[in-house]
Amino acid sequence: SEINNVDLIQGKIYSQLGNTDSANYFLNKALVGFKKNEDTVKILSATHAVALNLDKSGEYNKAVKTYFEVIRLAEKINQPKYIAAAYSNIGILFKIQGNNTKAKEIYRKVLKIDSTLKDTLSMASDMTNLGTLFEEEKKYEKALYYYQKALVYSVKSNSLYGQALSYG
């Protein structure tokens, strides 16, 4: 219903403003409404927004669990962009928590999805994320490899921001 859509939008805005408590209230209210109406796409969208808000509020373990719920829902209705986005955010959280091995595994999974989608902008981001991890591990040759690949995909997608990141 329209009220649920407004709640979802309000929740996203509160999250952007950093008011994660208000965001949580409106996002969960929207999610309950979408579930009641059995609106699978909206349930997916709201669940993803809840995960992002948990992430923003520093509740990383809950965020990871919710991102996996996003992946489960997205797989049911064949929404690979949501799957890639959720995995990418999980990779970031693993990196924040110092689990570079798991982060690399996740980023490679995201890269595979983005490659299948031929999403060159996301592929550039994936490559940059991998390059950053290898750079932190002082594996400079591997980091350089991924940064150079990121640059190629940034140019293909006309992303000046991505190109700037690749040049470091």
Image (tube, rainbow, N blue to C red):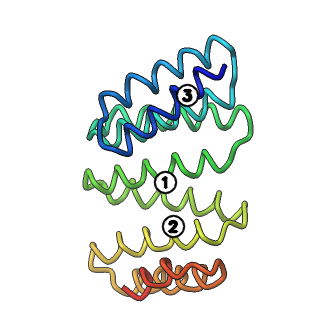
- Looking at marks 3 and 2 on the same chain, the residue that comes earlier in the sequence is marked by 3
Q: Residue at x 27, y 73 (%)?
A: 136
Q: Which residue is mark 1?
A: 88
Q: Which residue is mark 3?
A: 6
Q: What residue type is disc 2 on?
A: Asp
Q: Which residue is mark 2?
A: 126
- Whether label 2 touches label 1, CB < 8 Å: yes
- Looking at marks 2 and 1 on the same chain, the residue that comes earlier in the sequence is marked by 1
Q: Residue at x 43, y 68 (%)?
A: 129
Is 28 drawn above or below residue 81 in the view shown? Answer: above
Q: Residue 4: name its quadrant.
A: top right
User: How far apart are the two marked residues, 1 and 3, measured between alpha carbons?
Assistant: 27 Å
Q: Position of residue 157 (x, y in %)?
A: 65, 77
User: How far apart are the two marked residues, 2 and 1, measured between alpha carbons?
Assistant: 8 Å
Is 62 drawn above or below residue 83 in the view shown? Answer: above
Q: Residue at x 34, y 85 (%)?
A: 140
Task: Judge by depth and name the residue closer to the eye, 154 or 145.
Answer: 154
